[in-house]
Image (cartoon, rainbow, N blue to C red):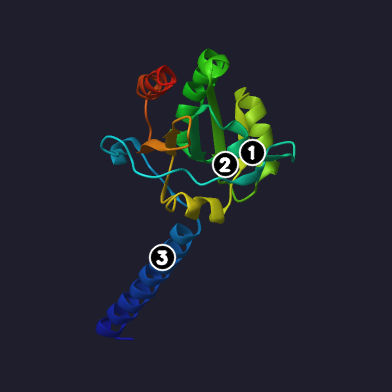
């Protein structure tokens, strides 16, 4: 075989492998929300218009949880997954907020978007010491919240379920605490 035919064969093989990789990556990205790393942080400026959609989702014990179960309370609704490092980094913040402000009118709800559902989320939540409400999300709920394109995506809701803030990507404890204090102070 001549050198030019070998070169052409390698070029074709490389092209096929690259095309296959692009297709595989596209399929994988379209199935699950992307992880929003620290460098992809976006904050909605000021207040976000709209009322959060009510949902009805199973918690980790199989009981149905509705957003409306917590009417009259300030809420943090966090879309996350067990495989997402920034999500894992935020869990201690939500647990601390739950412990500090739970008796003052705050509810934290973690909406897990893991494909495996409760079989992976329940042991993870137990291992992490997550005592705040955790539910198993789905594509319909993600769509109702404007399409969750990256995780973590966190909504801070006032007592009337109006969206006060939407955060895409990791946030520190102080950011969430400031929002919670502001909303708890409102009657």
Residues at discs 1 and 2 in contact (Cβ within 8 Å): yes
Determine whether 39 is above or below 105 in the image: below
Residues at discs 1 and 3 in contact (Cβ within 8 Å): no
Percent from the top left, x then y, of residue 102?
56, 18
Secondary-structure class at tag 3:
helix
Question: Which residue is labeled 1 in the image?
Answer: 121
Calculate the distance from the C-alpha at mark 1 to the C-alpha at mark 3. Answer: 30 Å
For the N terminus, which image quadrant? bottom left
Question: Which residue is labeled 2 in the image?
Answer: 112
For the C terminus, which image quadrant? top left
Calculate the distance from the C-alpha at mark 1 to the C-alpha at mark 2. Answer: 7 Å
Residue closest to the eye, 61 or 57: 57
Calculate the distance from the C-alpha at mark 3 to the C-alpha at mark 2. Answer: 28 Å
User: Which-is-in-front pick, marks 1 and 2?
Assistant: 2
Numbered tag placed on residue 21 in the rendering: 3
Percent from the top left, x then y, of residue 106?
52, 23
Residue closest to the eye, 167 or 114: 167
Q: Please tell me which residue is depicted at 48% across the width and 55% down the height of the picture.
A: 143
Local crowd at mark 3 within 10 Å, few (<14), some, or many (≥20)?
Answer: few
């Amino acid at each position: 075989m001549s050198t030019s035919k070998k070169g052409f064969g390698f070029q074709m093989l490389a092209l096929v492998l690259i095309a296959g990789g692009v297709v595989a990556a596209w399929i994988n990205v379209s199935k699950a929300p992307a992880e929003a790393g620290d460098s992809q942080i976006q904050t909605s400026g000021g207040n976000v218009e709209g009322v959060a959609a009510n949902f009805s989702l199973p918690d980790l014990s199989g009981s149905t949880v509705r957003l409306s179960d917590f009417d009259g309370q300030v809420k943090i609704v966090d879309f996350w997954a067990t495989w997402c490092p920034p999500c894992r980094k935020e869990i201690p913040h939500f647990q601390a907020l739950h412990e500090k402000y739970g008796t003052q009118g705050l509810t934290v709800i973690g909406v897990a978007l893991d494909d495996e559902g409760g079989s992976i989320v329940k042991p993870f939540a137990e291992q992490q010491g997550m005592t705040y409400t955790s539910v198993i999300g789905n594509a319909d709920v993600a769509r109702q919240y404007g399409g969750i394109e990256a995780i973590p995506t966190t909504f801070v809701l006032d007592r009337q379920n109006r969206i006060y803030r939407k955060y895409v990507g990791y946030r520190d404890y102080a950011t969430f605490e400031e929002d919670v204090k502001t909303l708890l102070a409102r009657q």
